[in-house]
Amino acid sequence: MRQAGRHFLQIPGPSAVPERILKAISMQTIDHRGPDFAEVGKKALSGMKTIFKTDQNVFIYPSSGTGAWEAALVNTVSPGEKVLMFETGHFAFMWSNLAKKIGLQPELIEGDWRSGADPNQIEARLRADTNHEIKAVCVVHNETSTGSVSPIEEVRHAIDAANHPALLMVDSISGLASIDFRFDEWGVDVCVSGSQKGLMLPPGLGFNAVSDRALEHSKSVTLPRSYWDWRDMVEPNQKGFFPYTPGTNLLYGLNEAIDMLHEEGLENVFARHARHGAATRAAVRAWGLEVLCTRQGQESGVLTAVKVPEGHSADAFRAVALENYDISLGNGLSKVADQVFRIGHLGDFNDLMLMGTLAGVEMGLAKSGMPHSSGGTQAALEHLKAA
Ligand SMILES: *Cc1c(COP(=O)(O)O)cnc(C)c1O
């Protein structure tokens, strides 16, 4: 049966794509080796530097975020080498799994899935690594499975305090363009990102921001690589071109997205996300439910993961909300499957869209018989009015 009105896509990525970007993408595909394309490519590459906040290198792949994860590792590490990772949640675990599959030795510091990475534990492990066997420290900036943010700048300080040469690699697939990120200032060596979250695009573009130091590493490391090879990108990129067919239409959309982010102002974009995160947490608390992230100051402005009471099914609730109110909410992943649902409040999003989203959640909680108090939507409204 037709559902009237618009669907609420409130998963933490892909986020709903704004009209301006859809329109940009709908332009005719052009010759990716022709002169008109050079301007598109140059604008995308230099524009992404302003989003990553770097004067160093940016590479763009026609890929999902997972591809960009692989690119970060195959260009910087050699077979059998160690990388240190922090288990903030499902995505950190998946990145370590990928590292294992391509022949690295990932060492995963265990986490509780309710907070960001702990710089103290990273520093202690690096201090113990006196032979410098660990080649990279890999941290997820915004852990999309839990709604916790890792303190990237403090992780850099931890590496420096241990006087360790490991590269700092960050997955900001769901953090970039939604929460504060500063590639150069924070001393990041590789940042991995994707198009379908804060950048407001459909899925299909993967990004690596790369320090000059990491790029230098890529010349001597020996993991086999072809499609992901940074070395093949450098020269064509200088003229706005790519070594193989790029995602031409998505690049049109990317250039529009970069313009939109700067028209609003990145700092305003970050403040908007933080405010919506705080209003959502006010709603969750008023419902008498639990926010999965328990570490104050590390709660995400991108999404909020909500724990449902023991013995109840988060997935059954999500199904009821989708069927009755046409709202898609994120599911709990792996370890927290069926125990949490995730409310995405990222991308091209405003106060009224948040209120519609929270109303959909509250009605879904009632309809599905989930134990809760009413008044969450009202609490969020009060927060928005005051803030
Ligand atoms: C979405 C996401 C990924 C995976 O990206 P894909 O585009 O699905 O491959 C990895 N890490 C984080 C933190 C994410 O949010």
Image (cartoon, helix red, strand yellow):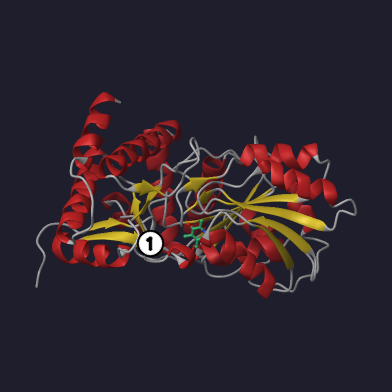
Q: Residue at x 51, y 54 (%)?
A: 173
Relative horizontal placement of residue 207, taking residue 356 as reference (left or right): right
- Return the residue found at the far top: 386
Q: Residue at x 28, y 45 (%)?
A: 288
Give how far across and how far down residue 308 sits, in percent.
33, 56
In the image, residue 305 above or below residue 184: below
Q: Quadrant of the N terminus?
A: bottom left
Query: What amino acid type should be assigned to the residue bearing mark 1?
Result: Gln
Q: Position of residue 266 (x, y in %)?
A: 44, 35
Q: Quadrant of the C terminus?
A: top left
Please indicate, yes or no, whether residue 206 appears anywhere in the rendered image.
yes
Left/right of residue 103 with respect to residue 89 in the rendered view: right
Residue at the extreme right: 131
Q: Position of residue 230 (x, y in %)?
A: 68, 61
Badge 1 marks a residue whose secondary structure is: loop
Q: Determine which residue is flagged by label 1.
A: 339
Q: In terms of depth relative to the viewer, which is nearer, 102 or 223?
A: 102
Where, by quadrant of the figure, is residue 365 drawn? Answer: bottom left
Identified at 31% across, 48% down, the residue is: 289
36 relative to 227 in the view: left or right:
left
* Residue shown at the point (20%, 50%) measured from the top left: 362
* Residue 186 x, y percent position in the rendering: 65, 37
Instruction: Return the residue nearer the eye: 235 or 326.
Output: 326
